Image (cartoon, rainbow, N blue to C red):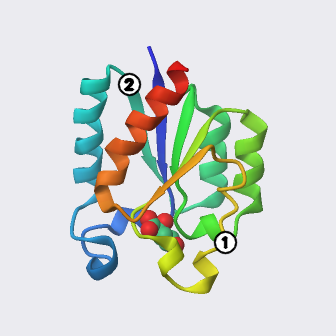
Amino acid sequence: MTHILILNGPNLNLLGTRQPETYGTITLADIEAMCAREADKLGVTFDFAQSNHEGEMIDLIHSTAAQGIILNAGAYTHTSIAIMDALSSVNKPVLELHLSNIHQRERFRQRSYISKVAFAMICGLGASGYPLAMRAMAEHLAL
Ligand code: DQA
């Protein structure tokens, strides 16, 4: 059965109260529940993780049994060559995901190291991007 890792980076544990004008009021637990409903529809399984620590995210990328990785790396998107290298090292399809439209925001958010190794990127759709990303990953893995 198709198995997907959905990995969330720093500060995303605070969704719901963190800058609601940018990220909405939905919590990460709500998003995980949305993903569970989508997984049932798609007939896939998934692991849902969040970490505020770059090294821990890298360990999760190295150790996952998932066939594909959906990654909202938070601010590490714009800084972490180490996470980019970890993704290249495991050689699994990566879909980059952001709640906000990073291209509409500050200039420093417009550079993404994750995009260099991702087959696709979804941004600007808020929490709805998560189930869409799962569908896109399931279709990509079925190709
Ligand atoms: C984010 C965008 C990043 O620039 C920011 O640092 C985040 C969240 C998003 O989902 O829109 O933490 O990845």
Q: Residue at x 22, y 34 (%)?
A: 37
In the foreground, 93 or 5: 93
Q: Which mark is residue 45?
A: 2
Q: Identify the amino acid type marked 1.
A: Arg
Horizontal and vertical percent position of residue 9:
51, 59
Viewer-proximal residue among 24 and 61:
24
Q: Position of residue 127 (x, y in %)?
A: 30, 57
Which residue corresponds to the image point at 63% horizontal and 59% vertical from the top-left? Answer: 54
Count of numbered labels shown in the rendering: 2
- Say left or right for 2 vs 128: right
Q: CA distance from mark 1 to mark 2?
A: 31 Å
Q: Is residue 11 left or right of residue 39?
A: right
Quarter of the image where the C terminus is located: top right
Mark 2: secondary structure: strand
- In which image quadrant can residue 93 be found? top right
Relative image position of residue 8 (x, y in whole percent)? 47, 54
> On the rendered structure, is 142 left or right of 62?
left
Residue 120 visible in this rendered orientation of the protein = yes
Q: Residue 139, relative to residue 73: is it above or below?
A: above
Where does label 1 land, which residue?
Answer: 111
